[in-house]
Image (cartoon, rainbow, N blue to C red):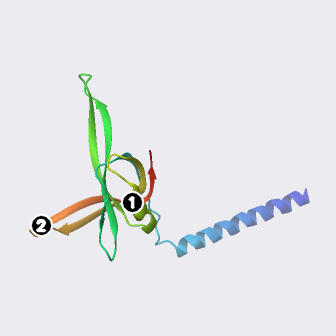
Amino acid sequence: MFRTVILQIRNQVARLNNVRYFTQEMNETANIEKCVNNVTLLGRVGADPQKRGSEHPVVLFSLATHTNYKYESGEFMQRTDWHKICVFKPNLRESVYKYLKKGQRIMINGRISYSEFKDAEGKNVFATSIIADDIIFFQ
């Protein structure tokens, strides 16, 4: 019985130490917040990829995804969404530029990015793009 009590006390102390350590760790990183920005798209390539830039090269292409829905009348409809895909990773960028073709089916894992710039007339233009981290080619 005495041995059981000692084991229980030792376990409680270990738990308290872990809590104390965790609390200390949280205080040190209290200003760091975890966030998630993940996008997964499965669709078809809208146009052959284009390479732009020399100092910071990027490969750009469009991807079409669609959603099917049914009207109250029973008629089925399909809505197509177009996504601008940017590939910055060097090896992925070269593979995409070399092997990806219009109409090919692919799956993209990446993150969404919003940007703002001025056009030739000086108006603010907002753009949304997907920064690709991984691309799976389907045959």
Query: Which of the two labelled residues, at mark 2 and mark 1, occupies the earlier sequence position?
Result: 1
Q: Which residue is mark 1?
A: 98
Label 1, secondary structure: give it. helix
Placement of 2 over or under 102, stated as above or below: below
Q: Is residue 38 visible?
A: no
Q: Position of residue 47 (x, y in %)?
A: 28, 52
Q: Is residue 40 visible?
A: yes
Marks 2 and 1, Cα distance to the nearest angstrom? 35 Å
* Amino acid type at mark 2: Lys
State left or right for residue 92 relative to residue 18. Answer: left
State left or right for residue 6 relative to residue 121. Answer: right
Q: Are marks 2 and 1 in contact (CB under 8 Å)?
A: no
Q: Which residue is mark 2?
A: 123
Quarter holding residue 1:
bottom right
Q: Position of residue 122 (x, y in %)?
A: 11, 70
Q: Position of residue 111 (x, y in %)?
A: 39, 59
Question: Which mark identifies residue 74?
Answer: none
Residue drawn where x is 71% and y is 63% of the image: 15
Residue drawn where x is 35% and y is 51% of the image: 101
Callout in the foreground (2, 1) = 1
Q: Looking at the image, which residue sits at the far front?
A: 98
